[in-house]
């Protein structure tokens, strides 16, 4: 708590307001109520956000039932943590009541479709979130969870994976328009920056991404939004402006030495791999037992199923 408070005092609002610090208890089930309430105190005292991984996996929601006898969202609501400054990442295993409660309090969800697939967490009910009026932003999660920070890829996966939840029910599909709104206006609202970013409009910050229109991904151009969501990979990004300042010009980053940064990253990775050899060996020994416990947890009946297959308790 002290480290978080010191970080808020030192960095929140720095770099012309571009650095914003949030209290971020990683997963509610791994926290004491005292810690969660302490984070809420920081939110109220400093006006910062509150961010956590919310109902990401079935293991998490089953543990919540065992520990609190209710959903994670219901427990956070009892503690008074939900509100416009609250953002829950993932939300894969949210129930309809959870989604309604989040929407009613003005909270938001960061939808991370690539991470949800790579970690086998399931398919988030993004359609239902939008239908309930919940603020939904689009994210990538960390690179260990979804391999990269490519928001174009996140848009494409978000637009594709939802379709398998509603076979031939195209009215329920999430398409390019919804996904682009998540990546722009929805993300701005989730961050509490709806009046500053998320759209190209008078009075908004000039945060702009320019692409090469003559690329193979964008030519021939039949529908610009569909091309950006379904075809573009990010390879055509030419210029990026942040607050009107050019930070990427003709594909070259102007703010850091990319070659030196990559070298430092590789050196750090090699060093950490060597330093953590013993820990990796222990993890390999523990993995079968952890996996067995997780399989037992997800076999417990739950009123919703976010997997792309019948649950272990359903008839095949």
Image (cartoon, helix red, strand yellow):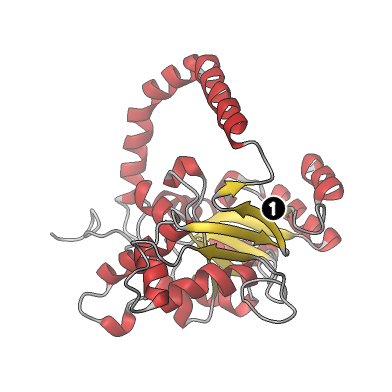
Residue 241 x/y as whole percent: 66, 61
Q: Is residue 295 above or below residue 137?
A: above
Seen at 68% across and 62% down, the residue is 79
Residue 26 x/y as whole percent: 60, 47
The residue at the far bottom in this view is 171
Residue 110 x/y as whole percent: 53, 62
Foreground of the two, 106 or 65: 106
Seen at 47% across and 53% down, the residue is 150
In terms of image quadrants, where is residue 169?
A: bottom left
In which quadrant is the N terminus drawn?
top right
User: Is 273 on the left or on the right of 12, as rendered?
Assistant: left
Dot 1 surroundings within 10 Å: few (below 14), some, or many (20 or more)?
many
Residue wearing tag 1 = 36
Q: Is residue 134 above or below residue 155?
A: below
Residue 74 x/y as whole percent: 56, 66
User: Is 179 on the left or on the right of 245, as rendered?
Assistant: left
Foreground of the two, 62 or 129: 129
Q: Is residue 166 above or below residue 290?
A: below
Residue 304 appearing in the image: no
Q: Is residue 272 above or below residue 217?
A: above
User: Is 44 on the left or on the right of 234, as rendered?
Assistant: right
């Amino acid at each position: 708590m002290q480290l978080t408070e010191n970080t808020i005092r030192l960095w929140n609002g720095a770099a012309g307001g571009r650095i914003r610090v949030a209290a971020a208890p990683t997963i509610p089930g791994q926290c004491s109520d005292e810690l969660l309430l302490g984070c809420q105190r920081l939110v109220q005292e400093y006006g910062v956000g509150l961010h956590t991984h919310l109902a990401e996996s079935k293991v998490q929601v089953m543990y919540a039932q065992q520990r609190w006898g209710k959903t994670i969202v219901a427990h956070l609501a009892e503690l008074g943590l939900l509100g416009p400054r609250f953002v829950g990442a993932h939300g894969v295993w949210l129930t309809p009541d959870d989604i309604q409660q989040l929407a009613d309090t003005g909270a938001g969800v960061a939808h991370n479709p690539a991470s949800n697939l790579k970690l086998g967490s399931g398919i988030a009910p993004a359609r239902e979130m939008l239908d309930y009026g919940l603020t939904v932003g689009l994210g990538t999660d960390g690179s260990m969870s979804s391999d990269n920070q490519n928001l174009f890829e996140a848009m494409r996966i978000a637009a594709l994976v939802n379709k398998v939840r509603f076979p031939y029910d195209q009215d329920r599909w999430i398409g390019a328009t919804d996904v682009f709104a998540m990546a722009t206006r929805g993300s701005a609202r989730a961050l509490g920056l709806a009046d500053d970013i998320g759209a190209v409009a008078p009075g908004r910050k000039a945060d702009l991404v320019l692409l090469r229109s003559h690329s193979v991904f964008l030519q021939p151009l039949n529908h610009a939004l569909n091309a950006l969501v379904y075809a573009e990979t990010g390879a055509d990004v030419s210029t990026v402006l942040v607050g009107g300042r050019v930070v990427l010009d003709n594909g070259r980053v102007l703010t850091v030495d990319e070659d030196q940064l990559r070298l430092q990253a590789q050196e750090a990775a090699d060093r950490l791999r060597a330093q953590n050899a013993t820990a990796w060996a222990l993890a390999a020994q523990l993995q079968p037992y952890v996996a067995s416990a997780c399989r037992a947890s997800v076999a417990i009946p739950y009123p919703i199923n976010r997997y792309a297959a019948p649950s272990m308790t359903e008839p095949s």
